[in-house]
Image (cartoon, grey):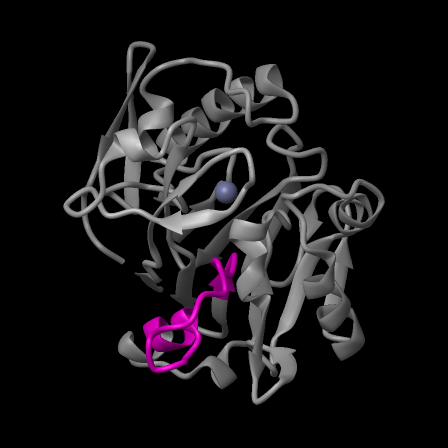
């Protein structure tokens, strides 16, 4: 298995839920009051039988007009048309905007040959609970393409991919485990968005169910340590991947080998 973080940059986000580029070397934190500072990186995974994108980033374009996630996939040595699975942890804008893109006034799928794997409850709640976190015009385009595989609860997608409904961050958030040979890759989405979240226990106001989200971080941290999972962190500042060790009741993130 090979894993490539597709780094899209760092951003400040305030109550408007707009992602504004933020570079600590150029910008001042004081100029962005009431903001969260987040880093964004979807992942590309090549297994023995699939080319997988997990969460699709912000849908931003480069200066030359190319979709950022497309450029990053090409830099990794692959082509977006070869992606056959797009796994979605949830549909908040920062994870789903890159599912589609506009070219010459026409909207289309970013991964035209892929099956988009989305939790059915998440899809329905995005439409029935309008909020700044969801952009349903993106989902309309995905739906028209007929490429969606709606899944529910826990289960197995194929011989390599299993999923679990977690809730916590949003009501129908899900996580994925990808197994290929002896290697196991875990994507916790916004349940385990950055390694630092394992190092101290806290309830976060941006979670739908903060208590459950806190318990889930602990739950998946322990499973990651027990099973030697290679973990992918979508919002990591510096360490996008790593393995987890548990010493007593304290987690430690180890960089370890690369995949
Ligand atoms: Zn997020």
Image quadrant where residue 79 sits:
bottom left
Left or right placement of residue 175 versus residue 48 in this view: right
Quarter of the image where the N terminus is located = bottom left
State yes or no: residue 194 in magenta.
no
Q: Please tell me which residue lies in front, 68 or 246.
A: 68
Residue 19 showing in the rendered view: yes
- Residue at 55% x, 76% y is 110
> Could you tell me residue 242's position as x and y percent?
28, 42
Q: Residue furthest bottom?
A: 104
Q: Looking at the figure, which quarter contains the C terminus?
A: bottom left
Q: Is residue 53 above or below residue 29?
A: below
Tell me which corner region of the image, top left, top right, bottom left or bottom right, holds residue 223: top left
Name the residue located 52 percent from the left edge and 19 percent from the top edge: 214
- Residue 88: x, y in percent? 60, 55
Residue lying at the far front of the rendered structure: 31
Answer yes or no: is residue 189 visible: no
Bounds of the magenta span?
A: 53-72
x, y percent for residue 209: 65, 21
From the top left corner, tell me how far across and down residue 147 is, in percent. 72, 74
253 vs 81: above or below: above
């Amino acid at each position: 298995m090979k894993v490539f973080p597709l780094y899209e940059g760092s951003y400040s986000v305030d109550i408007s839920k707009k992602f504004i580029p933020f570079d600590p070397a150029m910008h001042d934190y004081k100029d962005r009051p009431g903001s969260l500072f987040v880093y964004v990186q979807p992942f590309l995974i090549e297994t023995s039988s699939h080319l997988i994108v997990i969460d699709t980033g912000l849908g931003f374009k480069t200066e030359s007009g190319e979709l950022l996630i497309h450029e990053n996939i090409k830099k990794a040595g692959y082509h977006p048309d070869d992606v056959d699975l797009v796994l979605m942890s949830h549909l908040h804008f920062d994870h789903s905007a890159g599912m589609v893109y506009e070219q010459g006034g026409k909207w289309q799928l970013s991964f035209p040959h892929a099956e988009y794997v989305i939790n059915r409850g998440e899809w329905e709640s995005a439409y029935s609970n309008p909020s700044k976190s969801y952009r349903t015009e993106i989902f309309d385009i995905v739906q028209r393409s007929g490429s969606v595989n709606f899944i529910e609860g826990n289960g197995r997608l194929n011989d390599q991919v299993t999923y679990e409904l977690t809730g916590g961050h949003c009501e129908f958030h899900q996580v994925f485990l990808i197994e290929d040979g002896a290697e196991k890759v875990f994507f916790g989405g916004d349940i385990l968005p950055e390694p630092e979240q394992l190092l101290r226990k806290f309830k976060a106001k941006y979670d739908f169910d903060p208590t459950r989200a806190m318990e889930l971080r602990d739950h998946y941290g322990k499973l990651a340590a027990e099973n030697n999972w290679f973990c992918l962190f979508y919002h990591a500042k510096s360490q996008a991947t790593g393995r987890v060790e548990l010493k007593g009741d304290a987690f430690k993130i180890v960089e370890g080998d690369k995949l």
